[in-house]
């Protein structure tokens, strides 16, 4: 549910590149030529067989069921220009992703498509309403060969993940058509997700792609910290093991089977120094332009692994990070929501069975919307939209302008927190405030009409896209001292390096001083509720979703609340608030987002 999971990492060593870094068009690629002994790839018509064979690896990550083009900033990417300026490009939508991938495969006899997790979960209505069966169908049509699991694959628990893999009708909602859901044509890999009972992976740990005499092994893992970003019910009965230890273990197993070319699919990621998708994060030295959990992971994974496809942080990068032997190794991530795909060339050495690492090239490409739509995807979207339309097209509120989710404190975050406070007061008039995790807000509310509903109309489908988790809104008691500690946990502990700023309801105010470090960044004396200082000994009734109530996102103190009361789901709460507080002639204006005073 959180957008990222950031952990402290050791200071990075820097290494000189073994070849000149590629330009912007192939950001992060090593531009070294093929080994001197290379000869042209075989034509497939017999005769001479080259020692070296280029294999195209197409990859993407964090699709999150975005079959239709995402709206607002979720449907745009930033491109760095030659003169140093940037421009934004509309991107995403599986009708366009399918066309781009199919065009990219043309002329590449050896092509494999892989993904880095979070294909489903936190999905818009067209997929989420049907437990993401539409997305699995779309991925089958995209000819996805393999994916790792991500944390969101566990939103509905391991049994539902197994159903997505193996098929069958939903245990509660049944079948959505006269055809039984057949499941994924591709394997989900979960090497580091073990059953507590058996101690074995719940799904395949690895998979081997073969074409003629070429074979490449894929190992798939999700972040070890998955239990901290998924509801407790979703990970019940599961153990999540260390990513590096797991990958190294299965790399040895693959080598014992004679598979020497290996790619790791890792649902954990990094933070590039620039938000432009084509930023060259090798421009200083190998991997110097990217930070975050993936750096330490990459530096410790055995050199037997030839490339890393990553995800989770929703960022874009295609660069190199030194492996334990000091040699640069390609590490990629293709943003999120199907806005980018990565095209990596792996040069397979038939003599050794391994990848010629110095010739690896990789670049991210925009899924632009200026290409023809794939007709089979248009038909798939139409089929599921027809089923969803009676529910999705219903108006639930009216807004006067875009209500965005960006910023330390966002207008949409304020709106959702206010909705949860209003609902909390319905359950218990003594409710004092509400807290909302920013990672649970998945999209903005846009003023422009998405369909035929008209500008300013918020439909159920749009609300679902904002809050797709079906979390419940709960109440619990916290002492004033605990409430202060919760606010400090935003910028300390597991959130020290990558703060998670809770969205707060009206009446709660404080100062966030970013010139300080750790927990001191939340100024204790500034924390007030309705103008009064927080009393450490007093009891406060707090509304929040069940994810936070379980201590999610590093807010362990929220897991210590007392006198719990479980309410209805968060989308219903948002819907009630919008309906009660807006009309076509009196729409809701974006909140001012002025409850947190930020000192830079």
Image: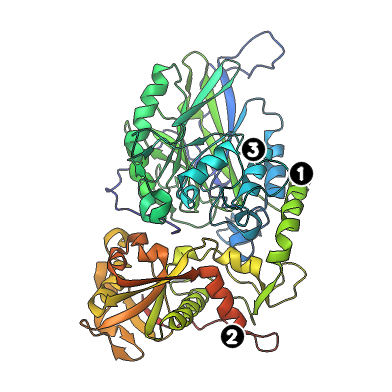
Nearer to the camera, 252 or 451: 451
Residue 479 at x, y = what percent? 25, 78
Q: How far apart, in angstroms, are the residues tagged by discs 1 and 3?
A: 18 Å
Mark 1 or mark 3, which has the lower sequence index? 3
Q: How far apart, in angstroms, are the residues tagged by discs 2 and 3?
A: 44 Å
Residue identifier under label 2: 581
Image-based side of 96 in relation to 493, left or right: right
Nearer to the camera, 225 or 263: 225
Residue identifier under label 3: 182
Quarter residue 515 falls in? bottom left
Nearer to the camera, 30 or 135: 135
Residue 187 at x, y = what percent? 54, 34
Q: Is residue 340 visible?
A: yes
Give the residue furthest to the bottom.
Answer: 531
Residue 65 at x, y = what percent? 60, 52
SS for tag 1?
A: helix
Residue identifier under label 1: 376
SS for tag 2?
A: helix
* CA neighbours of label 3 inside 10 A, class few (<14), some (14 to 19), many (20+): some
Q: Residue at x 62, y 66 (%)?
A: 72
């Amino acid at each position: 549910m959180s957008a990222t999971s950031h952990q402290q990492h050791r200071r990075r060593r820097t290494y000189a590149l073994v070849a000149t870094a590629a330009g912007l068009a192939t950001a992060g690629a090593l531009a070294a030529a093929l080994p001197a002994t290379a000869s042209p790839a075989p034509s497939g018509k017999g005769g001479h067989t080259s020692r070296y064979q280029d294999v195209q690896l197409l990859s993407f990550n964090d699709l999150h069921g975005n079959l239709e083009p995402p709206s607002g900033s979720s449907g745009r990417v930033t491109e760095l220009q030659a003169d140093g300026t940037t421009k934004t490009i509309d991107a995403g939508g599986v009708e366009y992703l399918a066309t781009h991938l199919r065009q990219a495969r043309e002329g590449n006899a050896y092509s494999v498509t892989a993904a880095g997790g979070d294909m489903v979960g936190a999905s818009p209505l067209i997929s989420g309403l049907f437990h993401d069966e539409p997305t699995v169908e779309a991925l089958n049509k995209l000819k996805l060969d393999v994916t790792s699991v991500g944390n969101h694959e566990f939103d509905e628990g391991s049994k539902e993940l197994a159903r997505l893999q193996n098929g069958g009708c939903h245990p509660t909602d049944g079948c959505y058509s006269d055809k039984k859901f057949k499941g994924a044509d591709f394997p989900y890999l979960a090497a580091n997700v073990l059953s507590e009972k058996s101690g074995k992976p719940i799904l395949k740990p690895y998979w081997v792609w073969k074409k003629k005499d070429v074979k490449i092994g894929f190992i798939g893992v999700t972040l070890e910290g998955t239990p901290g970003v998924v509801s407790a019910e979703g990970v019940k009965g599961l153990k999540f093991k260390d990513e590096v230890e797991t990958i190294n273990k299965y790399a040895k197993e693959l080598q014992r089977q004679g598979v020497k070319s290996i790619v790791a699919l890792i649902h954990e990621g990094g933070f590039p120094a620039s938000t432009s998708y084509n930023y060259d994060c090798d421009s200083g030295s190998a991997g110097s332009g990217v930070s975050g959990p993936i750096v330490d992971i990459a530096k410790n994974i055995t050199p037997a692994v030839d490339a890393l496809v990553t995800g989770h942080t929703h960022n874009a990068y295609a660069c190199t990070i030194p492996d334990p032997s000091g040699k640069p190794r390609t590490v990629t991530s293709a943003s999120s929501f199907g806005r980018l795909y990565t095209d990596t060339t792996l040069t397979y050495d038939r003599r050794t069975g391994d990848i010629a690492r110095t010739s690896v090239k990789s670049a991210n490409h925009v899924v632009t919307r200026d290409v023809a739509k794939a007709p089979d995807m248009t038909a798939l979207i139409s089929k599921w939209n027809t089923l969803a339309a009676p529910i999705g097209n219903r108006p639930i509120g009216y807004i006067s302008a875009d209500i965005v989710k960006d910023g330390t404190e966002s207008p949409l975050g304020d709106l959702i927190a206010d909705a949860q406070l209003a609902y909390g007061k319905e359950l218990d008039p003594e409710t004092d405030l509400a807290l909302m995790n920013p990672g649970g807000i998945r999209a903005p509310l846009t003023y422009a009409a998405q369909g035929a509903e008209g500008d300013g109309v918020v439909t159920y489908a749009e609300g679902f896209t904002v809050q797709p988790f079906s979390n419940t809104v709960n109440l619990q008691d916290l002492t004033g001292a605990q409430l202060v500690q919760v606010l400090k946990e935003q910028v300390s502990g597991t959130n020290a390096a990558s703060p998670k700023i809770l969205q707060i309801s009206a009446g709660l105010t404080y100062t966030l001083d970013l010139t300080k470090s750790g927990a001191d960044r939340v100024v204790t004396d500034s924390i007030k509720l309705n103008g009064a200082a927080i009393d450490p000994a007093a009891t406060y009734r707090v509304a929040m979703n069940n994810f936070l109530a379980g201590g999610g996102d590093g807010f362990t103190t929220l897991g210590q609340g007392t006198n719990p009361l479980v309410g209805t789901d968060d989308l219903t709460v948002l819907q009630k608030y919008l309906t009660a507080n807006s009309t076509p002639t009196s729409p809701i204006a974006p909140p001012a987002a002025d409850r947190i005073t930020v000192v830079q």
